[in-house]
Amino acid sequence: MTTFERAFSQSGRYLDASQVWEPGLEIEDARDDLDEVMHNLPKGARADLGRLITRMDAEFERRTLPNPGQMSEWTAGRWWWWWRMRER
Protein backbone atom coordinates (compact mmCIF):
# COMPACT_ATOMS: atom_id res chain seq x y z
CA MET A 1 0.00 0.00 0.00
CA THR A 2 1.39 3.39 -0.95
CA THR A 3 1.66 6.41 1.33
CA PHE A 4 -1.27 8.00 -0.50
CA GLU A 5 -3.44 4.88 -0.26
CA ARG A 6 -2.77 4.64 3.49
CA ALA A 7 -3.56 8.32 4.03
CA PHE A 8 -6.65 8.41 1.83
CA SER A 9 -8.07 5.22 3.35
CA GLN A 10 -8.38 6.98 6.73
CA SER A 11 -11.97 7.43 7.79
CA GLY A 12 -13.38 10.87 8.40
CA ARG A 13 -13.47 14.11 6.48
CA TYR A 14 -9.94 15.24 7.29
CA LEU A 15 -6.64 13.40 7.35
CA ASP A 16 -5.35 12.56 10.81
CA ALA A 17 -1.96 14.12 11.59
CA SER A 18 -1.38 11.64 14.40
CA GLN A 19 -1.04 8.86 11.84
CA VAL A 20 2.47 9.84 10.84
CA TRP A 21 4.63 6.76 10.53
CA GLU A 22 8.03 8.44 10.76
CA PRO A 23 9.87 11.39 9.20
CA GLY A 24 10.33 10.89 5.48
CA LEU A 25 7.24 8.71 5.16
CA GLU A 26 4.55 11.35 5.51
CA ILE A 27 2.22 12.11 2.62
CA GLU A 28 3.94 15.48 2.12
CA ASP A 29 7.29 13.73 1.70
CA ALA A 30 5.76 11.34 -0.83
CA ARG A 31 4.35 14.32 -2.75
CA ASP A 32 7.84 15.87 -2.80
CA ASP A 33 9.14 12.65 -4.35
CA LEU A 34 6.47 12.71 -7.06
CA ASP A 35 7.31 16.32 -7.89
CA GLU A 36 10.96 15.39 -8.33
CA VAL A 37 10.12 12.36 -10.48
CA MET A 38 7.91 14.53 -12.73
CA HIS A 39 10.93 16.61 -13.72
CA ASN A 40 12.88 13.53 -14.82
CA LEU A 41 10.30 11.69 -16.92
CA PRO A 42 9.90 11.78 -20.69
CA LYS A 43 7.01 13.89 -21.97
CA GLY A 44 4.42 11.09 -22.35
CA ALA A 45 5.09 9.51 -18.96
CA ARG A 46 5.11 12.98 -17.37
CA ALA A 47 1.63 13.63 -18.77
CA ASP A 48 0.33 10.27 -17.47
CA LEU A 49 1.77 10.81 -14.00
CA GLY A 50 0.57 14.41 -14.03
CA ARG A 51 -3.04 13.27 -14.45
CA LEU A 52 -2.70 10.94 -11.46
CA ILE A 53 -1.01 13.63 -9.36
CA THR A 54 -3.81 16.08 -10.19
CA ARG A 55 -6.37 13.66 -8.74
CA MET A 56 -4.24 12.96 -5.65
CA ASP A 57 -3.65 16.68 -5.07
CA ALA A 58 -7.39 17.35 -5.26
CA GLU A 59 -8.08 14.67 -2.65
CA PHE A 60 -5.26 15.91 -0.38
CA GLU A 61 -6.52 19.49 -0.66
CA ARG A 62 -10.10 18.37 0.04
CA ARG A 63 -9.03 16.47 3.18
CA THR A 64 -6.74 19.12 4.68
CA LEU A 65 -7.18 22.68 5.85
CA PRO A 66 -5.31 25.85 4.90
CA ASN A 67 -2.78 26.87 7.51
CA PRO A 68 -2.43 30.64 6.96
CA GLY A 69 0.16 32.46 9.00
CA GLN A 70 1.56 29.21 10.37
CA MET A 71 4.30 28.82 7.82
CA SER A 72 7.53 27.90 9.54
CA GLU A 73 11.02 28.58 8.26
CA TRP A 74 11.15 24.92 7.28
CA THR A 75 7.93 24.97 5.22
CA ALA A 76 8.60 28.37 3.61
CA GLY A 77 10.77 26.90 0.87
CA ARG A 78 8.47 23.98 0.18
CA TRP A 79 5.43 23.49 -2.05
CA TRP A 80 1.77 24.17 -1.26
CA TRP A 81 1.15 20.71 0.24
CA TRP A 82 3.44 21.59 3.17
CA TRP A 83 1.22 24.60 3.98
CA ARG A 84 -1.83 22.45 4.64
CA MET A 85 -2.94 21.25 8.05
CA ARG A 86 -4.27 17.86 9.08
CA GLU A 87 -6.45 17.29 12.14
CA ARG A 88 -4.66 16.31 15.32
Image: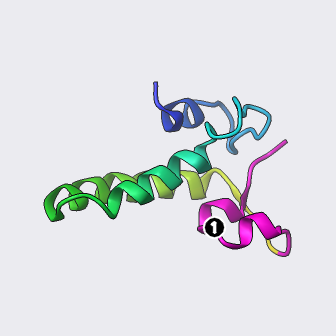
**Colour scheme employed for the rendering of this structure:** rainbow
Q: Which residues are magenta?
A: 69-88
Which residue is found at the position 73% from the left and 65% from the top? 75
| Residue 76 position (above or below residue 31) | below
Which residue is found at the position 59% from the left and 48% from the top? 29
- The residue carrying mark 1 is 78
* Residue 66, x across and y down, in percent: 73, 66
Amino acid beneath label 1: Arg
Q: Quadrant of the C terminus?
A: top right
- Is 34 included in the stretch rendered in magenta? no
Question: Is 18 on the left or on the right of 43, as rendered?
Answer: right
* Residue 52, x across and y down, in percent: 33, 51
| Residue 6 position (above or below residue 58) | above
Q: Nearer the viewer, residue 7 or 76?
A: 76
Q: Nearer the viewer, residue 76 or 50?
A: 76
Q: Secondary structure at mark 1?
A: loop
Q: Nearer the viewer, residue 24 or 13?
A: 24
Residue 8 picture quarter: top right
- Is 81 included in the stretch rendered in magenta? yes
Question: Is 31 on the left or on the right of 20, as rendered?
Answer: left
Q: State how many labels appear.
A: 1
Given the current orientation, which residue lies at the most extreme top position? 1
* Residue 84, x across and y down, in percent: 70, 60
Question: Is 62 on the left or on the right of 47, as rendered?
Answer: right
Which residue is found at the position 61% from the left and 36% from the top? 25
Q: Within 10 angstroms of label 1, few (less than 14), some, or many (20 or more) residues?
A: few
Q: Can residue 67 be seen?
A: no
Residue 71 picture quarter: bottom right
Which residue is found at the position 57% from the left and 52% from the top? 60
